[in-house]
Image (cartoon, rainbow, N blue to C red):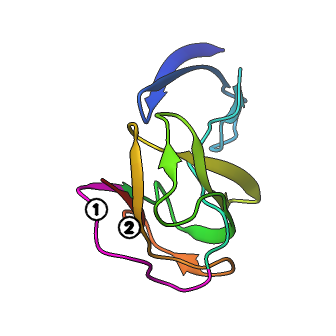
């Protein structure tokens, strides 16, 4: 068993990897589940103008929820969207305090890695 510390989006996770004899696929167990920022459902794909801070999808997946609306004040770490990826729900959070400038996705949309979900001013 080997132990590793992995950092994802600035958050560290302790993982253990067990190598099985003759198996080429290691078994991985994580101490905690990653949190990915997610937003509330939006009425339209784009609302308002582009903001200076872009919140992007950390991986490909499907938008399950939008938790904010245009012109809403948000605090750093507040959930703005929920992304389903690899059968897990990931909270997508605001990167800093600000006002929601635009929501660039709708609930049910499939998104790609680094696609802009929400922008903040």
What mark, if any, has residue 116 been given in the picture? 2
Query: Toward the viewer: 82 or 87?
Result: 82
Query: Toward the viewer: 57 or 102?
Result: 102
Q: Can you see residue 36?
A: no
Main SS class of the magenta portion in the image: loop
Q: Which residue is drawn at 39% across and 69% down?
A: 115
Q: How far apart are the alpha carbons under marks 2 and 1?
A: 11 Å
Q: What element carries label 2?
A: strand
Relative to 92, residue 39 above or below: below
* Left or right for 38, reference 50: right
Q: Is mark 1 on a helix, strand or loop?
A: loop
Percent from the top left, x then y, of residue 101? 37, 64
Identify the residue under disc 1.
Answer: 51
What segment carries the magenta color?
43-54
* Left or right for 33, reference 113: right
Q: Residue at x 51, y 75 (%)?
A: 111
**Quarter where residue 38 is shown:** bottom right
């Amino acid at each position: 068993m080997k132990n590793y510390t992995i950092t994802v989006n600035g958050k560290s996770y302790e993982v253990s990897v067990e190598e099985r004899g003759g198996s080429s696929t290691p078994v991985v167990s994580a101490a905690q589940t990653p949190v990915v920022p997610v937003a509330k459902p939006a009425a339209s794909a784009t609302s308002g103008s582009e903001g200076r801070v872009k919140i992007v999808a950390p991986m490909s997946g499907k938008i399950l929820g939008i938790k904010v609306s245009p012109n809403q004040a948000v605090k750093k770490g507040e959930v703005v969207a929920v992304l389903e990826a690899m059968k897990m729900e990931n909270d997508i959070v605001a990167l800093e305090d600000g006002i929601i400038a635009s929501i660039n996705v709708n609930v049910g949309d499939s998104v790609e890695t680094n696609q802009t979900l929400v922008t903040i001013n």
